[in-house]
Structure formats: structure tokens, C-alpha cells
Image: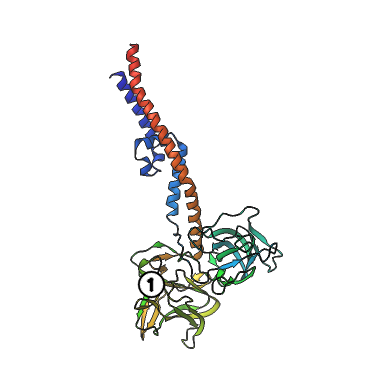
Amino acid sequence: MPPQHRFRHFLGGVITLAVCGSQARVEAASPAQTGNPISRIARVFDPQLVKVEDRVSWLDSRVSTYAQHYEFPLKTGLGYRGARATQGGPDPTVTLDLGKEVPVDSIYLVPAQREFFEDSGIFPKRFTLELSKREDFGQRTILYTSGSAARPPADCTPVYFHAKDTARYVRLSIQEGHNKGTTDVFGLSEFVVISNGEPVSFGTKVSTVGGLDVPGMWFPEALTDGRMPLGIWHNKPLMGLDPGDAVLTSSAEETTTWSITLDTPAKIDRIQLFPYQVNRSLETSVFPEELAISVDCGTGENPESVFHWDNPVTGSSQMTPMVVPLQGKNAKVIHITAKQPWVMGDRKIHALSEIEVWSGGKNLARNLPITREHAGQNVQITSLTDGNSSEKEIMSVGVWLNQLYERGRIERELGSLRPIHHQLASRSELNATWGSAVILGLTFLIPVFIVAAA
């Protein structure tokens, strides 16, 4: 075999061994990145590129499992806004009274909805979170403080704080907000406290200092009503399931009542009602324009009215679950009555996608049959207690908020890694191309020297 041929075989064998030896690492990268020989060679000799590539691939696979982040602006009850009353005045504060001492696992501050897409929002820049068993906070635990460093904008993503303490009171104090005609303006959509995996802040008493209240729009109670501009608490699509229960009515005066009989009487903490999404639409949902809830102890006589609601903005969609705190009301039978239909064109519809009845951290309604009464007919249905909402699996609000927080954190990391990955890949592939050209050139020059020497 001529000397130049032997050298080419030797060089090809060396490169082949190097590529095969690093095959496990190369396979972690996407096919688009490693589909040509130059890309493979570049990753053989650049471990930093492979490391960044592996991290990007892992983050991409991880983020795909989390709940999707959507923004659905609320029409009413937007949340709470506050500000410093006077220059040099006391810090604006928001204090939740949870009603009793509970172990606090985590806290989520949900930013107020943005006024426009590029709006940086009014999430507080510097603040302190404190826990206490005493109303005067004479003894307290500082869960978080910003110090002198301002937090970056939250981008409508829930902000998470890990806790491991027992408290009855939770206080948020604002050291720096935004100067928008008033000093240190800030705003939140929801203030969520989780204990043993359960929300304990819904319907709790809220006291504030420095409020900028607007009736029906911005007020303290909107911080604990469970309504957030982030959509419905679900994630995984489950095709082929009944999306809920929808009834067409012939007139606006007709009513529909869904009744649930629990296995035993129980003290009800809250009822959660999920809207019915129209044809898997992301922007339209069906929810009664007027709704009432009553309970009884199982006798069926003289049910007690415990809740009544009218849509403040007629025809507006409710793209968030409705949370009805009942503060331990004793009941065995729950009646939910749609009194006014949602109207689309000439269609009048009563609909819900799921009903949950929570007591002591357990959904007592899960998998129980529901009796629907409409137009003099009673029908048993099971699609309102199957754990799904509009063909998606419902999540607990704590898990849902945590997944949105993790998704935001990972997407920010991906946003910083992708330019680095692109730069490393371009540089390494350029170097590999140059190196390959030099080596291929040598395969022709070396035989020339050998012949000349001979």
C-alpha cells in the first residue's frame, strides 16, 4: 500500500475512535446539532459545549412537563394596590390572619396582571415577608427580606418562598415600590399561603396600610379570593373525556341545580367550581351569569343559603376557578343552582366542568354521583366529579403555582443559556472545520516529502 494511503487509513482510524469513544455524550445533543461530521468532531474536542448542550436538553425536557403559563386578564377583582401615604411615611403593609396557627410550607405572591404586553408591572421591588403567632408581631420570623437589592420584574409569574414555621399571621411590608405619581406603588393579584399542601389563605381576613382601593377592582379581599390572571389550575390534556356538564335552556328564567350528597355530614372548608371551556378554546369559557349555593344536613328540608353570585360584567368569561370559602359550615347535601344562563348568540347555556367540596384537606366530592335537576327531570351524572376540567387533569393550587414558578425559573435559565450554546457551537464547529482542513492538507503534503526524501 502506498505511504499516503496508509497515512489516510491511520488518520481516519484515529478520528473514528475518537468519535465512537464520545458517542454517549454526543447522543445527548439534538440531531440537528450533531447530524453532520463537523458537528460531531466539534463536540469531541469541546467538553464545555457538550456540557452546555446537555444542560439545555435536560431543561427542555423538564419544562415540557410543567403547567403552561397563560395570561387571562381579569375584568373585576383584579387584586390589591397600595402605596406609601406620604414621603417618609410608614411602609405599606398587607397582613393575613389565617384564623388559627398552622404549619406554613410555602407562600406565593402572584403579580397583578399587566396593562399591556411589555408592561413591567407593579410587583414590589424591595419587601419583607414575616410570620408570627402574635397579631402585633412582637415575636416574628423573617422569612425573606430584599435588603438593599431590588428584585427583577416578576413577569406575571408566581414568586415562591419556602417556609418551615408555624404561624397565624403573615405580613408583607414594602420598602420600595414604583413611583407612578404616588410614592412606592405596588400591586398583587393573590397572596397564597400553603399548609400541608393545602391553601389556608382563601377567604382569610386581610388588613392593610396604605391601600389604593377602587371598589370592585382593587381591594384587600381580592388578595384571598382564589382568582388569578393565570387561567385554570390544570395541566395534562386527557382526550376523550367528557369536558363537564352543559345544559341548553329555552329561556333565561329556567334554572339548573346540581346536587351532591356526601357520604357523611362534614364541616366544609370551601367549594371550588371550574368553568366549562368552549371547544377547548383558550379564551372562552361558560359559567352561569348568576349562581347560588345552599346546603342541608340530609333531610332535604329548608336548605340554608350560603352563597350568591352575580357576574359583575355581564357576558365576560371566567377563566379561573371560583373559590367559595364556607369556614367549616356543616353539611351533607350541597345544591349549586345556575339561575341565569351564559348567552352566546341565541344559545342559553348552564354549564360547569368540575365541582370540588373540600374538608380537612380532602375533596369529598371526588367520584360521587351528582343529580342534575332541569326542566322537571332528574339525571345522574359523573363528569363533574372525575378530577378533570374541560379534558385536562386538575391540579391542587399549590402544585399548580409551584409548576408555574419552576417553569418561569427554567425558561429564564434557558433564555440565558441558548445564546451561550449558540456561540460555543459556532466557535467549536469553526475550529473543527479549520482543523479538518489542515489535517486533510497534511495527508497530501506528507507523501510529497516522503517521495522527495526518497
Q: Position of residue 408 (x, y in %)?
A: 49, 55
Residue at far bottom of view: 301
Color style of the picture: rainbow
Mark 1 closeness class: few <14, some 14–19, many ≥20 residues within 10 Å:
many
Quadrant, the N terminus: top left
| Residue 187 picture quarter | bottom right
| Nearer to the camera, 268 or 216 | 216
What type is the residue that disc 1 sits on? Answer: Gly
Q: Residue furthest top?
A: 454
Q: Nearer the viewer, residue 407 or 395?
A: 407
At horizontal 34% and vertical 28% (from top left) the residue drawn is 12
Q: Secondary structure at mark 1?
A: loop
Q: Quadrant of residue 27?
A: top left
Count of numbered circles in the view: 1
Q: Residue at x 35, y 68 (%)?
A: 279
| Farthest left residue in view | 1
**Which residue, given by chain and number where applicable, does mark 1 sit on?**
244
Residue 195 visible in image = no
Q: Quadrant of the C terminus?
A: top left
Q: Indicate left or right for 430 with 146 as reference.
A: left
Is 242 left, or right, of 217 in this rendering?
Answer: left
Nearer-the-camera pick, 225 or 220? 220
Name which residue lies at 56% across and 70% down. Answer: 218
Residue 67 position by quadrant:
bottom left
Q: Outermost residue toward the right?
A: 138
Coordinates of residue 151 in the picture (x, y in percent):
59, 55
Can residue 310 be seen in the rendering of this structure?
yes
Establish if 323 lies above or below 16.
below
Residue 132 position in % (x across, y down): 66, 65
Q: Indicate the position of residue 234 as horizontal and vertical percent values.
A: 44, 64
Residue situated in front as seen by the camera: 333 or 15:
15
